[in-house]
Amino acid sequence: MTDDPIRHADPSALGRRGRLILITLCGATFMTGLDYSVVTVALPEIGRDLGFASPSSLQWVATACLLPTASLLPLFGRVSDMVGRRRLFRVGVALFGAWSLTAALATGPALLIAARAGQGASAAMITPTAIALLTAAFPEGPRRTKALGVNGAVLSLGFVVGTLGGGVITSGLNWRWTMLLLAAISALVLLGTTTVPRGTGPRTPARLDVPGAVLAGIGLFALVYGISTGAGAGWESPPTLGSLLVAALSLAAFLRTERRHPTPLIPLDLLNRPTVKCSGLVGFVTLGMCGGTTVLLGLYMQDVLGYSALATGAGFLAEGIAALVAGVLAARLITALGRVRTMSLGLAVQGLATGAMVLLPAHDGRMLLLVTSGAMGFGHVLAVVSFLTTMTSGVREQEQGTVAVLSQLPQFLGGIGTAGLAAIVTVRTDVQASSTDPGHALLDGLHAATLTAGLICLVTAALPVLLLRTAPPDGSSQRARGRARGPVRPRIEEDAGP
């Protein structure tokens, strides 16, 4: 199949086949982003319908999906290099649809939680392979940057649509339709995988670092579990402290094992590259602070302004629209400014917008809320696209699967940011509770947390330009190689796999 002629005239044009591939891979991204937010909105109705015993047990509907996704990412990143990324992607999408259908038909808490765990394991197959397939399909340069921009915008859109759509669906129908929607999307994505090209390169030799996979899985599982349950159980409770201790010991043992293993799960020389380390830090900060602030904005709208669940979902529209705009403009900004400067710009915009939320009032705060959340979403997506572009640049084909895993880990470890901001809210609210009413005490806590998040983003914004040499505008390195080696024809690179 040949590419559209426009792709040779315009290096940033995706081409007809490229657009089909991008729609498929972004469909998977949208599906996994939609999953978490749509279920979170539906939790109260799920609890009433299936008879969950307590709010803490109901929270497992969300946590049961998150834990296997985070803990199995390194394993499936390696497996994708062994069995073929397209094959594992298709298996993951098919299983995600099957587990979503099982969740829709669940008759009790146990079956629903089991189905949610299955969805999480399937998402661990989908998430890294989607990024690896995307970076393999679009060569480094303007087209890859444009594709990553669309992918980042779609991920944010999935959250917003899930928050708003979850309220609409559960209000007009019932929560089971949210699971049926996920099953329908997975069927469409599975159909679209026929557009994803077969590979021409050799696969990685089929040797799995079993000790590394076990230690990484245990460490990430314990870390995410401790973060997810710490606020409810108490940060000083034995289960929370025990899980965090297990996480620290397992991850330390993992790093020690990787130094000695001949074919490590995550090569330490790759992990120590400045572009990977700095981009990973930026990803951790932008995802953690944006995710945590978004949770706080939900509290502000519902507990301070008194919004309904549906109105709260609508309150996130500005963030979603701004994220889409940023995804469209990201490639142009990276071409003009370079990856590093765009990364810093995105974090700075996110930091300023988040810090400005300290001005949110106790009444009539809708306009300032829309402006600040929209600016936060815009800066966040710029930071996400530029950190992904930086991390995946200059990576060999056999490293794409591992880099895809590393690029997705900040999304799950960003829960540390959410937990930290929530802790600030709790402490500050408790301090103010004796001198003011509950609404104003909570608002004061939210102000303290958003100001902290803004300052963290602004400090981190300086790191890329300090730690990384300013990258040239995207695509210039490819043009330089083209002058040295002759004309470079844009092409769809095909990944190893059946």
Image (tube, grey):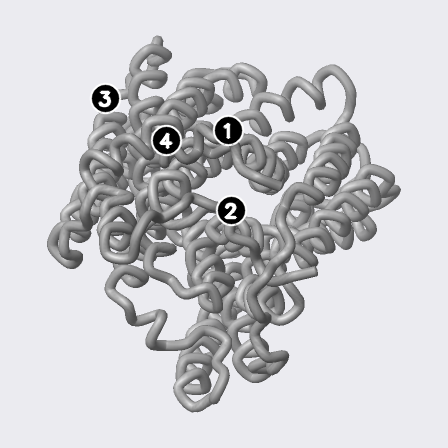
Q: Disc 3 designates what residue? A: 359
Looking at the picture, how far across and down is residue 151, in whole percent?
48, 38
Q: Residues within 10 Å of mark 1 (few under 14, many from 20)?
A: many
- Identity of the residue furthest to the front in this view: 486
Q: Secondary structure at mark 2?
A: loop
Which numbered disc flags the more N-terminal residue, 2 or 3? 3
Residue under label 2 = 492
- SS for callout 3: helix
Identify residue type, mark 1: Leu
Q: Which residue is mark 4?
A: 10
Residue beneath the point at 58% across and 41% down: 25
- Single out the mark in the foreground, 2 or 1: 2
Mark found first going from the N terminus, 1 or 4: 4
Discs 1/3, front:
1
Compare marks 4 and 2 and give the one earlier in the sequence: 4
Residue type highlighted by circle 2: Ile
Marks 1 and 4 close (CB-CB < 8 Å):
no
- Amino acid type, residue under disc 3 in the picture: Leu
Q: Give the secondary structure at mark 4.
A: loop
Query: How far apart are the alpha carbons under marks 4 and 2?
Result: 15 Å
- Can residue 176 be seen here? yes
Question: From this viewpoint, is residue 64 visible?
Answer: no
